[in-house]
Image: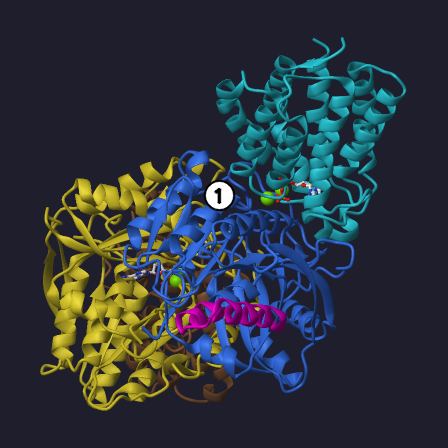
Chain colours: A yellow, B brown, C blue, D cyan
């Protein structure tokens, strides 16, 4: 294992200390329980957007704390969802009275822990909602399983909903927008190499010199299938077509009923992409793949989208939701409408994403 | 042996701390194959915290002791196993209430409360390739043993044997819950890490009862 | 070799095509000869800032083309300096009449090729100057050698001088500022792994599982020395102290005399850092090291600077001047003054660096 | 053999194309040890371009042919070797002027012009571990041979032997110019890639003269 770290148990803590030292204008870090929060939190009258998840995906989520994006982020151990006390304390710290929206990637651990946090926050009288991100088309079956993972779409949802909250959207409006943006987004990832969880000390899986994993998530887990390594064009086309041709996707999610003070099941169906759709295209590095290779992917993605009647109207290219130092990339396409584009274009000032300010 | 004492419960938890520490790499290795390579680290982190706090509650009633374990796991483990095992001990503690010792019937009640809690939280069905596949057969065997008139130790022996079998039986299953479900058919042929830690925890209880 | 590429001879071309497709608002790409240039070039009345060098350092330089930074960038083959025709054509394309400043990293290849380009541009009546960047303290001796390499300081100089040009600085003012900023900057790099040049197909050097290279450049070349891998804290402290304790550095550079139409030698001496200096700290990933590890480095760097009476007043943390997918990092400290800070803070809008707009 | 013909010059360049292609990996490998692993690729890329353009100038005078080679290398090789070898052929071409064939003395003049050009551009001294360490001894031997009355072929044999020796003599040197200079003492023990390509180019000329 070759990493720039000190003692393994201190990895997450020291990275957070570095963030705090580097970005005092944007954010602060609270330790025990650990959460990153906006330097100017709580922002009066504003719905607080909180996300979180295992560490190892940097800059997500801590790097997206700041004006126009997240109010707080709760980092767990590497690839391990954070605990409810982190989320609950973060919620109390950043809630201005307008309520808290938890953006939760769909992993059993994240879901269960954020559910507990929501219950705790509700118990304190904080208006709260949990919206799931589940966009990974590599996960096929949803009826009897944990369903699709939350991957690339998370970054876009955090940006868009963060801007909406900044613009004065209510908790319900933010929730509706988050749900819609999630339903508009679809992703798929691939790996050229495994990553190494510091505590494990060796790569999570082994890939031969001429192999790649297709349909990976963001936790160094193996993917849908292993294939012979092929060209950037073929990989891009294959992944883009899986996204574009993905059919309607139906699953049941749990959302919070503030009046009843309990969870209720909600069935959601995502419509497939259609000719004429205008999309945000997000080509993401898993950490070890340099941006130059992402441009080779983007070149082909642009071509494939055009050939399928889909117009890329915005793009994001770089390492934003990573798996430690894994080499590989993911592609996310998100259908847009005026509301989504308006909030995508709105100013954002975080260590990980910044424009317009 | 007629009752399970508070001291035995405390010793169970101490043994669990040790056994999960010893099996840390093994559990993480199982989780590498079909998960994200952290189950051993997660459980070890949580039970180290439990070990720290145990002395402060060792003279409390069993309900309080188990609830402390549940709270500690919830706020230190994270992942899927944190809330699930947290719920296990919390609900077990609620079922134990203020008792200072447990009869065989009460042991069934406590563990049934614990397992029901996990199922309510995680909603996994038998055969989904999760910790439930060790916990549910264990509960069935424990209850059957006590109903048939066995004492706690005898029934617990059956329960642990059933948990071990249930753990091994996860190998041919395709996962439908948790992280392993993303692998689809590729999850077949690997033993579930959570079922394994459940077996280890129940086995630690058995060891404690033998003393 | 595991990379997202197609045919090896097309690697640079296709990455440039991807950039052009992704960032039409910021830049355009000219092929044969290859150069990236501002979409709105030439900008009336503004001195044009041009840099260039081998490819494989992305986002540098192409990703720094845009408002407030570079007017054009000339990408060579991977790790191979570009050719004079690229530079000369780029100069003609972006020169508004106010002249062209070539920012040249000090490598024999870059120096010689940019010198030829300057001669050609001068021959066309374009006012021109070449300013060298040579900031790598890992290169000790300078008297009879090629001198120090241009590494991390390049990114900072491009930002600062780009902003000055945007603000209306003349060619001579831009040249003076570039020379000063270079003299204020010092860097050092290290590698955890080698990178693989696509055309070579295998890693440039082999490093054992417990080894690291200290004092590497940005071309996958081996470094000053090989050492046992140690902790992030020890590595950071060692590198930071080499930079902070680096003595006065004297060398002779060639600059262009526009009146004489010839080169002349100029002796430059950089003063060492002093207690009380306010610096920009730049922690850079060599490509394969994720930003999370850079934060662990920044944490220690901040501590070491404080302990040595040096105050970090700005920072930049991320992959900005890379060596393909090499794992490792570099540290750059640049002394600041009001002029430098003003232009560092000025708005910039490029694919690779953006703020204030 | 009294004169070097235009056809021999063209053939020299063709042989150079081939020999640099054959030694592409070898040169890159030398450059991996003390540089950036591209010298073979650089030279091969440049001389492939030369090969493309050669037919269009093969009936021009020697000066024009060599200048075309120089321009082509300058605009296609890049790196340090691009401007240096570009200058070599450009200055060689200038020295050859409009000649259609070269006497032994004229061959000395042409190659001296070429080597002087490289030295002016790169400012490397003997012993700096660069292509100069092959080129300078070769020039000295060529000039000495012709002065001593040898014909072009004989003098060129001496020159190539000197280039080869000079190339090998770079092994123990510590580099003071180019990328290898960054390595300090670690550059010792490796043969310089540029000196190697210089030897190969001069050796190709010798082969051409033999025909
Ligand atoms: N819904 C569920 N119900 C019961 N157990 C589950 C469920 N989901 C996952 N598990 C158990 O959790 C284990 C994984 O725990 P762990 O690795 O600590 O968490 P994570 O999957 O978040 O990394 C699995 O092996 C499985 O036994
Ligand atoms: N100043 C110089 N004068 C003469 N030759 C030089 C000089 N600098 C470098 N070289 C030669 O160039 C060779 C390297 O060429 P190449 O690898 O193509 O370029 P780069 O070093 O830019 O990658 C070295 O082996 C050396 O012989
Ligand atoms: Mg986990
Ligand atoms: Mg796990
Ligand atoms: Mg090179
Ligand atoms: Mg080279």
When asked about the image quadrant of residue C259, the answer is bottom right
Q: SS of the residue at dot 1?
A: helix
Which range of residues does the magenta coloring cover? Answer: C160-184
When asked about the image quadrant of residue C210, the answer is bottom right
Residue at the image position 51 percent from the left and 80 percent from the top: C339
Residue at the image position 28 percent from the left and 54 percent from the top: C24
Tell me if residue A266 comes above or below residue D18 in the rendering.
Answer: below
Query: Could you say where residue C303 lies in the image, as x and y percent from the top left?
Result: 60, 81
Camera-nearest residue between C8 and B115: C8
* For residue A246, side relative to residue C354 (left or right): left
Residue linked to disc 1: C85
Camera-nearest residue between C124 and A243: C124
Q: Is residue A132 among the parts visible in the rendering?
A: yes
* For residue A99, side relative to residue D138 (left or right): left
Asked if residue C174 is among those painted magenta in the image, a careful observer would answer yes
Q: Is residue B169 among the parts visible in the rendering?
A: no
Query: Could you say where residue A88 lies in the image, as x and y percent from the top left?
Result: 31, 82
Q: Looking at the magenta stretch, what is its main secondary structure?
A: helix
- Quadrant of the drawing holding the C terminus of chain C: bottom left
When asked about the image quadrant of residue A166, the answer is bottom left
Query: Could you say where residue C343 lies in the image, as x and y percent from the top left?
Result: 45, 76
Report in which chain the residue with disc 1 lies. Answer: C
Q: Residues within 10 Å of mark 1 (few under 14, many from 20)?
A: many
Camera-nearest residue between C307 and B49: C307
Residue at the image position 35 percent from the left and 70 percent from the top: A61
* For residue C289, side relative to residue D206 (left or right): left
Asked if residue D201 is among those painted magenta in the image, a careful observer would answer no
Camera-nearest residue between A253 and A232: A232
Tell me if residue D127 comes above or below residue A348 in the rendering.
Answer: above
Taking the image as four quarters, which one is ligand 3 found in? bottom left
């Amino acid at each position: 294992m070759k990493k720039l770290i000190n003692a393994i148990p201190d990895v997450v803590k020291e990275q957070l200390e570095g963030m705090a030292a580097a970005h005092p204008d944007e954010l602060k870090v609270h330790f025990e329980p650990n959460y990153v929060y906006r330097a100017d939190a709580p922002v009066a009258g504003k719905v607080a957007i909180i996300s979180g998840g295992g560490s190892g995906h940097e800059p997500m989520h801590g790097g997206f704390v700041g004006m126009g994006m997240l109010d707080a982020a709760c980092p767990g151990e590497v690839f391990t969802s954070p605990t409810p006390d982190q989320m609950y304390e973060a919620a109390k710290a950043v809630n201005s009275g307008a309520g808290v929206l938890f953006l939760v990637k769909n992993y059993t651990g994240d879901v269960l822990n954020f559910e507990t946090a929501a219950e705790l926050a509700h118990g304190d009288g904080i208006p709260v909602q949990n919206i799931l991100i589940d966009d990974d088309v590599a996960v096929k079956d949803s009826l009897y399983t944990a369903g699709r993972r939350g991957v690339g779409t998370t970054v876009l949802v955090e940006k868009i909903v963060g801007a909406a909250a900044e613009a004065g959207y209510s908790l319900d409006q933010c929730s509706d927008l988050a749900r819609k943006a999630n339903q508009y987004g679809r992703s798929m990832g691939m790996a050229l190499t495994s990553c190494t969880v510091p505590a494990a000390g060796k790569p999570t899986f082994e890939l031969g010199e001429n192999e790649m994993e297709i349909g990976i998530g963001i936790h160094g887990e193996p993917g849908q299938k292993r294939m012979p390594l092929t060209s950037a064009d073929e990989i891009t086309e294959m992944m883009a077509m899986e996204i574009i041709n993905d059919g309607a996707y139906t699953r049941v999610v749990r959302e919070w009923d503030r009046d009843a003070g309990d969870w209720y099941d909600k069935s959601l169906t995502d419509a497939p992409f259609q000719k004429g759709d205008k999309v945000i295209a997000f080509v993401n590095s898993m950490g070890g793949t340099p941006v130059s290779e992402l441009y080779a992917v983007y070149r082909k993605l642009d071509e494939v989208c055009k050939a399928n009647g889909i117009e890329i109207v915005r793009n994001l290219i770089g390492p934003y939701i990573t798996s430690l130092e894994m080499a590989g990339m993911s592609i996310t396409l998100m259908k847009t409408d005026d509301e989504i584009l308006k909030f995508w274009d709105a100013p954002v000032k975080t260590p990980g994403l910044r424009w317009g300010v | 042996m007629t009752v399970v004492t508070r001291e035995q419960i405390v010793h169970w938890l101490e043994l669990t701390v040790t056994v999960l520490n010893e099996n840390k790499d093994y559990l993480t290795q199982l989780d590498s194959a079909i998960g994200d390579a952290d189950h051993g680290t997660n459980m070890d982190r949580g039970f180290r915290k439990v070990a720290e706090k145990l002395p402060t509650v060792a003279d409390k009633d069993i309900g309080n002791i188990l609830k402390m374990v549940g709270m500690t796991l919830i706020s230190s483990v994270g992942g899927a196993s944190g809330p699930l095992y947290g719920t296990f001990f919390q609900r077990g503690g609620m079922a134990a209430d203020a008792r200072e010792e447990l009869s065989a019937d009460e042991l069934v009640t406590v563990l049934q409360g614990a397992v029901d809690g996990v199922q309510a939280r995680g909603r996994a069905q038998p055969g989904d390739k999760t910790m439930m596949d060790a916990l549910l057969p264990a509960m069935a065997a424990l209850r059957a043993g006590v109903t048939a008139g066995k004492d706690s130790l005898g029934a617990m022996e059956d329960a642990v044997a059933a948990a071990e079998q249930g753990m091994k039986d996860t190998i041919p299953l395709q996962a439908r819950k948790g992280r392993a479900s993303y692998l689809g058919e590729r999850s077949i042929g690997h033993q579930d890490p959570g079922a394994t830690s459940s077996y280890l925890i129940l086995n630690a209880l058995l060891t404690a009862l033998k003393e």
